[in-house]
Amino acid sequence: MPLLKELGTRKKVQEKRYKNKAISSIYAAGIGLPMYGVLSLMLAYKGDKRMMKAIVVVDNMKGMGIPGEWGLCIYIEYKDQKILLDTGASKLFQQNSNALHIDLNEINYAVLSHAHYDHANGMETFFQENDHAKFYVQETTADNCYFKWAFIRKYIGIPKKIMEKYKDRFVIAKGKQKISEGIYLIPHSTPNLDLIGKRERMYQKKATGWFPDNFSHEQSLVFQTDKGMVIFNCCSHGGAVNIINEVQAAFPNQKVYALIGGFHIYNKPEKEIRELAKKIKETGISYVCTGHCSGAKGYQVLHEELGDMVQQLKVGLELQF
């Protein structure tokens, strides 16, 4: 299990990152460690130079007095690289980044997990804050995603015309793509994902008509760590188990260690969520951290089935691998 910390105000962040003196700087959420266990974890960390850490900037669940929203944004440091995954549903990620002492201008790369508003609406704010980082999107990303049911046509996509307005900032990813040493983008390779789109009433509007979303615009951001491959997929519309299997197929000689992100099960029946937990366990993965579109009920059921293998995403949570 990765080291867990919870970050608060800028002052607390500075104290916890640089001084590392207080026992409270270790956040053992859900682990139930006694004080001597927390102290042992601190002592183990003191000389431990972990290769990656991730901080939740935006999630549905607020943390340490920092607000949340329906959306997701995660800041990641990997070796000497700084990456922003998604930008949430508004400018809130900018406010929260300031509270968490994250300098958006220092971001080297940004990645869009998929073409939905609750992950993309802060993109223009990011471009205004950072004038150099390239933004990686899958090749089918476009402003054409809708919720469609009966007479309802609700746009749920990226900001209109943003890819035209900032065309020089986008990098179009095709297939398995290496961003930097140890950092990869993995698109879906599982067939018939349009059946999921149809069930969720998610559609793409194209020149030739309406088509169930096959989530070809969704991608996993994957990191190679000493523990194994760590996957970030912010909504897992293509299915959490499918995503684990896709990454395993892309790296057949590597262990898939962790999956982090939403699972889009907030609207699923309990029986289906329990079955998902069983299948996740069968993949052999060691750690799951979920929130956002997993919902409170979804997380509760997963925790009942997976125990301490699963942890709750929330604003300010820091994971270290």
Image (tube, grey):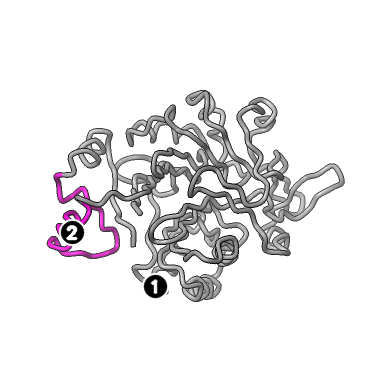
Residue at image point 21% right, 50% down: 47
Chain-order first, disc 1 or disc 2: 2
Residue 36 in the magenta stretch? The answer is yes
Q: Residue 37 placed where, x, y %?
A: 17, 63
* Residue extent of the magenta highlight: 21-45
**SS for callout 2:** helix
Which mark is on residue 38?
2
Q: Nearer the viewer, residue 226 or 150?
A: 226
Residue of label 1: 304
Q: Nearer the viewer, residue 173 or 310?
A: 173
Q: Quadrant of residue 121?
A: top right
Q: Amino acid at mark 2?
A: Val
Does residue 37 sit above or below 223 in this rendering?
Answer: below
Residue 58 placement, left or right of 24: right
Residue at image point 49% right, 26% down: 130
Q: Residue 176 placed where, x, y %?
A: 62, 52
**SS for callout 1:** helix
Quarter of the image that includes the C terminus = bottom left
Residue 287 placement, left or right of 208: left
Quarter of the image that includes the N terminus = bottom left
Residue 110 placement, left or right of 164: left
